[in-house]
């Protein structure tokens, strides 16, 4: 998500902060909904990063304009008195110059030289064109001549096809990924993501399968999966497949590309939609670790939150590096493997959720009163109200205080789980 080149005032209400490393991101709670258990959940969106909390200034991203059409930008005068000594470094203007200097900086040029030899410059130039202009088979030769590139780099479509077919072979791709991984891997934490595209060209229809994708429509689907280093943010390796791959089966597919990353063990940090017993089992079987959200509807999660919510968390329970967030850790068994649960309490989030819960109860009570007045009430359809009938078949109700109190006391808690028993609360939350 791109950031805007202007600063703005923080919204007056419904905001929280998410800290990652040294940066605080501004989260706006714009609505709430009921989940499958009938509990209210905030609908959130990240609208920028905090600049000055006391002055209530932040740098917004494009999401800010979606939820705040009348943006409150701050007019800031340009600082012309910045000394030259404060500028760390600059890069020469021009796409190829920038790409060349960056490739040296991240050791990409060194790896390309090792794998492709004299073709290194051609491959890097083609990649630069693809980065800024898209399909390298369209317009590259004209672009190269327009920018006065070396004649050896002014390739036509036939020459480009030969590069892809004879130079960039599967064997050299595998060799490149091995060298690249050894050069840029800096941390034991990896991140992964994937992108689905839907080609429409008739010439490649025979190579695609139909699948019901996230749009619930039968479309031909390509999936590109990428693993990248969380610290350096550089991609390490990739793979692709054809046909629909759901979230819970996708991880099995993405784990396969680890065969290219030889001699390494990984910690996979996953979102909740990747949680499944098969995924966790496969990660553990391969000798890797995982950190993921434990779904609240699981019996294990309910029992853990119920246990911790009865305790008073104090100063000694604070998570180092995270203001006001507290936790309790406990051992548990998951899929016949010993794991550690980290039950976190976010006080700021709790206050907002409790306020939303109270508002939700008021709305539910008003709806129930209207249903009783119109004689359209359906008993057992209101989780937090006990409904009965008197002798005259008139409906009456009372609040289910026990159920309300139980759910109210557990708001603001969430659980992360890991099969690495040595991982600290700060590491799993970072």
Image (spheres, rainbow, N blue to C red):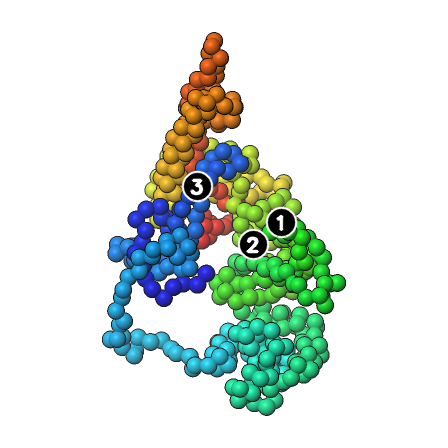
Residue at the (65%, 46%) spot, across then down: 278
Q: For numbered disc 2, what is the local secondary structure?
A: strand
Which residue: 32% across, 46% down? 13
Whichever of labels 3 and 2 marks the residue nearer the N terminus, that label is 3
Left or right of 57, for residue 158 = right
The tag on residue 268 is: 2
Cα gap from disc 3 to disc 2, whole angstroms: 30 Å
Which is closer to the viewer, label 3 or label 2? 3
User: CA separation, marks 2 and 1?
Assistant: 28 Å
Tell me: residue 389, above or below residue 326.
above
Q: Position of residue 265 (x, y in %)?
A: 59, 58
Mark 1 surroundings: few (<14), some (14-19) or many (≥20) residues within 10 A: few
- Res 235 quadrant in image: bottom right
Q: Position of residue 332 (x, y in %)?
A: 55, 39
| Sequence order check, earlier mark of 1 and 3 | 3
Provide the residue designation for mark 3: 32
- Comparing 393 with 135, the one in front is 393
SS at badge 3: strand
In the displayed structure, 430 sits above or below 162; it is: above
**Residue ID for mark 1:** 216
User: x, y percentage for residue 301?
Assistant: 52, 37
């Amino acid at each position: 998500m791109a950031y805007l080149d202007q600063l703005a005032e923080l919204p007056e209400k419904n905001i929280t902060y998410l800290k990652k490393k040294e940066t605080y991101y501004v989260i706006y709670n714009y609505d709430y909904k009921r989940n499958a258990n009938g509990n209210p959940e905030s609908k959130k969106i990240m609208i920028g990063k905090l600049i000055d909390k006391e002055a209530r200034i932040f740098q917004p991203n494009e999401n800010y304009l979606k939820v705040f059409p009348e943006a409150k930008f701050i007019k800031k005068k340009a600082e012309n008195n910045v000394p030259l000594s404060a500028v760390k470094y600059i890069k020469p203007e021009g796409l190829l110059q920038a790409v060349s200097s960056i490739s040296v900086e991240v050791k990409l040029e060194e790896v390309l030289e090792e794998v492709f030899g004299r073709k290194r410059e051609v491959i890097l130039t083609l990649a630069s064109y693809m980065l800024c202009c898209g399909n390298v088979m369209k317009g590259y030769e004209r672009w190269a001549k327009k920018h006065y590139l070396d004649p050896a780099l002014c390739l036509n479509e036939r020459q480009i096809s030969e590069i892809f077919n004879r130079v960039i072979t599967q064997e050299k791709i595998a060799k490149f990924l091995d060298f690249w991984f050894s050069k840029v891997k800096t941390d034991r934490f990896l991140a992964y993501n994937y992108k689905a595209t839907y080609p429409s060209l008739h010439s490649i229809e025979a190579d695609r399968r139909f699948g019901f994708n996230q749009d619930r429509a039968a479309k031909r689907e390509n999936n590109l999966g990428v693993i990248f280093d969380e610290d350096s943010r550089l991609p390490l390796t990739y793979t692709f497949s054809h046909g629909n791959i759901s979230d819970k089966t996708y991880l099995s597919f993405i784990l396969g590309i680890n065969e290219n990353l030889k001699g390494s063990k990984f910690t996979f940090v996953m979102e909740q939609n990747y949680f499944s017993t098969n995924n966790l089992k496969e990660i553990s079987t391969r000798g890797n670790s995982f950190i993921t959200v434990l779904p609240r509807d699981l019996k294990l999660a309910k029992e853990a939150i119920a246990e911790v919510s009865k305790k008073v968390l104090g100063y000694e329970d604070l998570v180092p590096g995270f203001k006001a967030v507290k936790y309790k850790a406990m051992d548990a068994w998951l899929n016949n493997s010993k794991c550690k649960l980290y039950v976190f309490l976010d006080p700021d989030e709790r206050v907002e959720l409790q306020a939303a819960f109270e508002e939700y109860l008021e709305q539910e009570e008003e709806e129930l009163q209207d249903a009783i007045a119109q004689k359209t009430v359906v008993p057992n359809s209101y989780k937090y109200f006990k409904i009965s009938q008197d002798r005259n078949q008139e409906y009456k109700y009372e609040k289910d205080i026990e159920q309300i109190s139980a759910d109210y006391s557990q708001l603001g808690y969430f659980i992360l789980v890991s099969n690495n028993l040595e991982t600290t609360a700060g590491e799993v939350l970072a």
